[in-house]
Amino acid sequence: MPPRKKAGASSQFDASEVMQPVQALRGRMDAAGSSRKRTLEEVGVSGVSKEVQHMGAEDVSAEIEAICMRAVASIMRGDGFSYMMPSRVASNQMYVKELDRVVLKEKMLERVFSNASSARKTAITTRLMQIVLELCSKGIHVTKRDLFYTDVKLFKQQTESDDVLDDVACMVGCTRSSLNVVASEKGIVVGKLIFEDDGDTIDCTKMGMGGKAIPPSIDRVTNVRGDAQFILLIEKDAAFMRLAEDRFYNDYPCVIISGKGQPDVATRLFLNKVRSALNVPILGLFDADPYGLKILSVYMKGSKNMSYDSINLTTPDIKWLGVRPSDLDKYSIPQQCRLEMSEHDLKTGRELLEEDFIKANPKWHRELELMVKTKVKAEIQALSSFGFQYLSKTYLPRKLKEGDWI
């Protein structure tokens, strides 16, 4: 029996014509010069906290030891001890238009051990710093789950140790990955990309339909290269698998990345690293619902939970390719594939309309207004009503050929 032929592009589209708008977009990026992100100091924004930076193990250890010595000195003076750190509550965050990302404002939080309401969190903070010191001295990485199990009785729930870990990063002034604590593998990548993973060469065209898991420790990813002309960022792994199996990247040279829903830190850092190395456009494929747009905004503007590290975690220049609310009529999505928005959906949509980063992009605002007005949403999978390969053979090639992104 002859081997199964790999799926190719639909005959109704010429690959060279399809790629012309993408190549033009890339040319405009090159003409615009460096895509280096500006810092708070460069734009002269006042009333905000200093953004954290990547730090080596020795620097992290030195800063933690200095924090602990200040606490010891306070105890010896008879003043007890406390920790000062930037407050990460929503009211202490702001969107900076000049930077196109969410950052922390300058309000500080004091965590006092002698206060009954904060004594336990102060103890958790101290314990986590002790563990991080050990990790840095041994030069090893652990997952957030491993960290939780080092002291279950104190932490009680992983959400508590995860939350305080971000506080420790803020207090030290480093990225969370600098603490040698990583999340479990979640994101996946496939396509025209080659990189070294801790010395091993990874060719992402040979990863099958499941793709290559994005390493949780991005520090070990080096020598990123490839001949992709764009990055296709996908919300869900179902669409990712469809495109991977159809070898979409062979007909339209690209790197395909998915965070499988809400992206983890490693996926966001990896996207940033690939974008910087290849200097190619990023096109986003997300559900036409408020949550798809919120997930896309996390990649672009940052999450409020980790706004202290938005300079490293955000990729502002992502283009919204689809599925957009206006696509539902343009591509004649059947009514049975259009879902009625719940009151919670509508509430989320209206809240998004008030976000500064949405208001800053009129085209995004119009799409979201259309969604809220029609009270209709749709998932990427709605395209499968025209056939399982409609996404790879018709929808995306047509979108690319028309340069239909915002």
Image: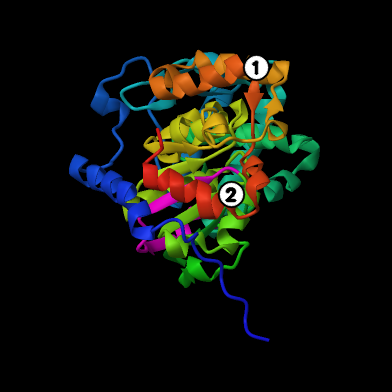
Q: Is residue 25 visible?
A: yes
The residue depicted at 38 percent of the width and 59 percent of the height is 15
Image coordinates of residue 136 in percent, x first then y, are 52, 52
Q: Amino acid at mark 1?
A: Leu
Give the residues drawn in magenta, as a range. Answer: 215-235
Q: Which residue is mark 1?
A: 346
Residue 225 forms part of the magenta stretch: yes
Residue 66 showing in the rendered view: no
Q: Amino acid at mark 2?
A: Val
Label 1 SS: helix
Q: Is residue 344 magenta?
A: no
Q: Residues within 10 Å of mark 2 (few under 14, many from 20)?
A: many
Per the image, the residue denoted by label 2 is 182
Q: Residue at x 53, y 57 (%)?
A: 189
The residue depicted at 63 percent of the width and 40 percent of the height is: 128
Screen quadrant of the N terminus: bottom right
Q: State which quarter of the image contains the C terminus.
A: top left
Q: Is residue 291 above or below residue 24?
A: above
Q: Is residue 5 left or right of residue 42?
A: right
